[in-house]
Amino acid sequence: MDKIALILLAYLVAAILFILGLKGLTHPRSAVRGNLIGALGMLLAIVATLFAGELIDNPSGYWLIGIGLVIGSVIGGVLAVRVQMTAMPQMVALFNGFGGAASVLVAGAELAVFDLAKNAEKVAAGDPQALPGGFIVFTGLLAGLIGAVTFWGSLVAFAKLEEYQSFKKPIRYPAQQPINALLGVIVLGLLVAGVMNPEIGWIYWLVVVVASVLGFTLVNPIGGADMPVVIALLNSYSGLAAAATGFVLNNSVLIIAGSLVGASGVILTQIMCKAMNRSLAHVLFGVLEASEGSATADEVYGGRVKATSADEVAMLFDTARSVVIVPGYGMAVAQAQHAVRDLYNVLESKGIDVEFAIHPVAGRMPGHMNVLLAEAEIPYEKLKEMDEINPSFPQVDVVLVIGANDVVNPVARTDPSSPIAGMPILDVDKAKTVVVVKRSLSPGFAGIPNPLFAADNCLMYFADGKKAVLDLVVAAKQ
Amino acid sequence: MTMIITALTIFVLAVFVGFEIITKIPPTLHTPLMSGSNAISGITVVGAIIAAGAGHGWAASTLGMLAVILAMINVVGGFLVTNRMLAMFRRKR
């Protein structure tokens, strides 16, 4: 078999390994193995590429490649090993951005050396590896566009998740969406111009610049709580950028792997939007305002909020048979997951059945809460999805809400004009008693008061998440 | 033209496969899914290697090498981070 065929075969095996690897993620049992299989596929793809004809013809190039591989591996390895679990979302955003940047550079490099005339000859001669020049230029520009948006968008997402001061509040300026629309039109116009005039190389870099600005302006106005959706979307984009680059190089493994990632990102984005009952367009372009007719905090809370203490909650636990814990972003911020595990152990040792209710958009990333609780060594069978656990709330004795707000706000069910109207929530208000651990009555991302806090069966435990849970552990042990 | 159709065929089929697999992944594993699929998107390193090593001039080689570094960070970082997360789900009580 000739060399090219062998490499293509290796690419096919690598693609199969990627698919099998992702399949492994369908269950925690096979997940670790799945990840390893995926990594093996990547190794195979890299090794096979090293045997490509163009590289063997240019042996000095191997130095550059080798140095690049080593530097990248070291940086990636160090970052991955040293990052804290709670910073996982930001890391994913950062890595994602780098992938997008890589696509921009690769497409740029390929277009820079692309010889229109020579390619036309190859096409005319019927070379099976050759693609029409216009197609290559088009997909190249596309790769640059998507890659640039991904890179800068991911950087902004990273900054917001790391809560850098200047990015904490979504920066709003007038004519925001028209400016984005204008940028979009400009970049598409440049795309067309680039395809019509493939000899003008610098159009590519102009597209990259405008797309970079667009990446920044698109993600900037979006609030921190919507980052899960944004990251899922950017994840998809980096896959699409890789696929586009694959079209430029006519490289099958790039196309397949890029498409797989692109598809996975789109599905996740859809799932998240459905969970929030907001359309993607609303997340990206809309602004969350409390509606005119809704109640103010005073009206909702006035005189009806009951504060409680660790001892009082411990007494509730004494007579409880079933407890459900609802974690939220606040738990992650307070780093309370290990304290929660201690509480879980104490309660279980008293014969209480403890489960965790995980809302799909709790936290900063889909599955964020699950990762944190798994890190705290809570058995994953105890982590229940919203749809699974919602029907059982009426039979639950005590619900402990830690750092969650909007996902347990009954207003989503009752008030059609509320910003969270229609969003599926955890029906904790149906339980016998709800204890909410929160530092104060400050609103969540939706900016609205939560009538749950004023309900008759609700007690507010005002304290820092970690301290509150630790105090509960002590009190419950007595 | 047939090459374009072939490439498009691969793309379309891959999208279908992606959809089928991803919809079966439980929400509890969505974060490792994000970081795992992100690692796979580092496949760009293959294109970067070709760009860097094909000796098509200093521009391509420089851009290529930079791309190799960035893509490799994506790949190695991505798979390691995913492994860290998944290892925590392994423990059975």
Image (spheres, coloured by chain):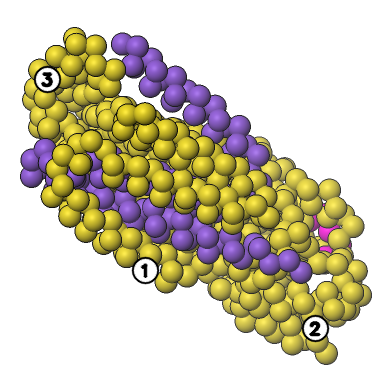
Chain colours: A yellow, B purple
Q: Chain of mark 3?
A: A
- Sequence order check: which comes first, mark 2 or mark 3? 3
Viewer-nearest residue: A232 or A95 = A95
Q: Which residue is mark 2?
A: A476
Separation of marks 1 and 2 at Cα, in angstroms: 41 Å
Looking at the image, residue A464 lies above or below residue B68: below
Q: Looking at the picture, which amino acid does disc 2 mark?
A: Ala
Q: Chain of mark 1?
A: A
Separation of marks 2 and 3 at Cα, in angstroms: 78 Å
Question: Could you tell me which quadrant the C terminus of chain A lies in?
Answer: bottom right
Is residue A376 something that shows in the picture? Answer: yes
Q: Is residue A115 left or right of residue B91?
A: left
Is residue A244 something that shows in the picture? Answer: no
- Sequence order check: which comes first, mark 3 or mark 1? 1
Determine whether label 1 and label 2 are within 8 Å by CB: no
Viewer-nearest residue: A87 or A305 = A87
Residue A248 shown in magenta: no
Q: Looking at the picture, which amino acid does disc 3 mark?
A: Lys
Look at discs 1 and 2 and give the one toward the viewer: 1
Q: Looking at the picture, which amino acid does disc 1 mark?
A: Val
Q: Which residue is mark 3?
A: A118
